[in-house]
Amino acid sequence: MTQKTIYFLIILVGIHLFGSLSSEAQTSSSKKGSTYLQQLNAEEIIRILQVSPQQDLNNLHTLIINYKNKLTQTYEDKLRQVLHELNVLRNPSYQYRVWQVAKQMEGLNLYHDYAVSGSKENDDVNTCVNGWCQVMAQTGQYQLKDLVGANIKLMEGTIAKEQQKAKPNLRQAKPKYIHVQEVIRSSEKLGFLPLDLDLAQRGDFCVQYYRKTRLQDQFSAQHISVIDMVVPWGNDMFELRDWHEGVEGEPFIYRTGTNKESSHNNIFVEQNVYYGYQDNQGYERQIFTKNPNICQAYGYFGENVAQAKVLIHQINYLRGQLYMLKNLGHYLPGR
């Protein structure tokens, strides 16, 4: 058996498995169409191999390519449809309010109210979840209003320092969730669901996971930011733009992929993004700065969480199928 024939057999096995798996995620009508397409091509392939296996290998190659292209187009069309259905569940007024609140907060220092005994100023160590709570609580969504409580008691030294600034923070509510892990544990109750980062929109949030010596080589959610937009760069690259607090020595800031040293890790390629269809959490990103990490988005759907969860599951499945098809192409001779 020639190497070329082996390649074809690998593709045939892959197509058979792919067709079997894909039918489980489709509606009854699309199941019938997919099954018919699969049987039609399988019968044609068997006929070619039985009649003249050596002479018609080129025809078989063409048939497999055409089948692969048809499947790819089918899943790409379905993915666009499901993405549209998912985005219909978004809340434009919420998204606009996120933009309003976050813009007003740009340039503000945010504080804790558990200052060290005897200190004259509030604690402003970097805890970026602080800014996230402040923005979300002011959007007007009932699920998010309790993310902050009573006002922090600003100490005299903090007030004096703030009064010297062009944009002082003289009033700040106390955040309910200090740790990012607590936000993640409560995410669905708050109206958020895990979502692939390149599909995120304004008002979603981004979590950065780090694996460093201080974490004993275990991934841990360390930072959270308010997503503004995702900008496609092409060739499976994109840029995340977000609002972020917690950069040491800087206030609540807006980051593009390049406007801050801390935001260089907002540029993504396919190999270093966590996707929902992957079994593992992904790979630490090789970035320009000293903190390689893994990022994942949580999309806000509010009262539509139950519907959105079903659609996100379909999106993950379709993306997984397209990933399989893309990699099957590597086994095709001459590809």
Image (tube, rainbow, N blue to C red):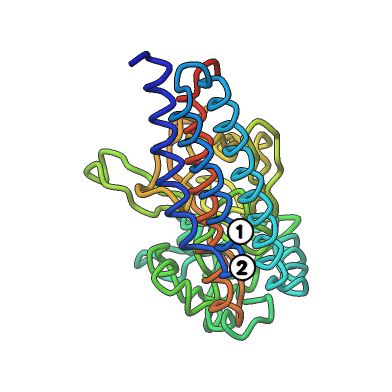
- The quadrant holding residue 12 is top left
Image x and y of residue 68, in percent: 57, 38
Q: Considering the image in quadrants, where does the N terminus appear?
A: top left
Residue depicted at 69% across the width and 81% down the height: 140
Within 10 Å of disc 1 (Cα), the crowding (few <14, some 14-19, many 20+) is few
Q: In the figure, 239 relative to 112: above or below?
A: above
Image x and y of residue 44, in percent: 53, 38
Q: Amino acid at mark 2?
A: Ser
Total numbered badges shown on the rendered structure: 2
Give the distance between the C-alpha atoms of the residues marked 1 and 2, in whole angstroms. 7 Å
Within 10 Å of disc 2 (Cα), the crowding (few <14, some 14-19, many 20+) is few
Does any portion of residue 163 appear in the rendered image? no
Q: In the figure, 98 relative to 230: above or below?
A: below
Front one among 31 and 262:
31
Indicate left or right for 69 with 152 as reference.
Answer: right
User: Secondary structure beneath disc 2?
Assistant: helix
Mark 1 touches mark 2? (CB < 8 Å): yes
Residue depicted at 71% across the width and 63% down the height: 84
The residue tagged 2 is 29
Q: Amino acid at mark 1?
A: Gly
- The quadrant holding residue 90 is bottom right
Image x and y of residue 180, in percent: 42, 62
Q: Considering the image in quadrants, where does the C terminus appear?
A: top right
User: Secondary structure beneath disc 1?
Assistant: helix
The residue tagged 1 is 33
Front one among 230 and 160:
230
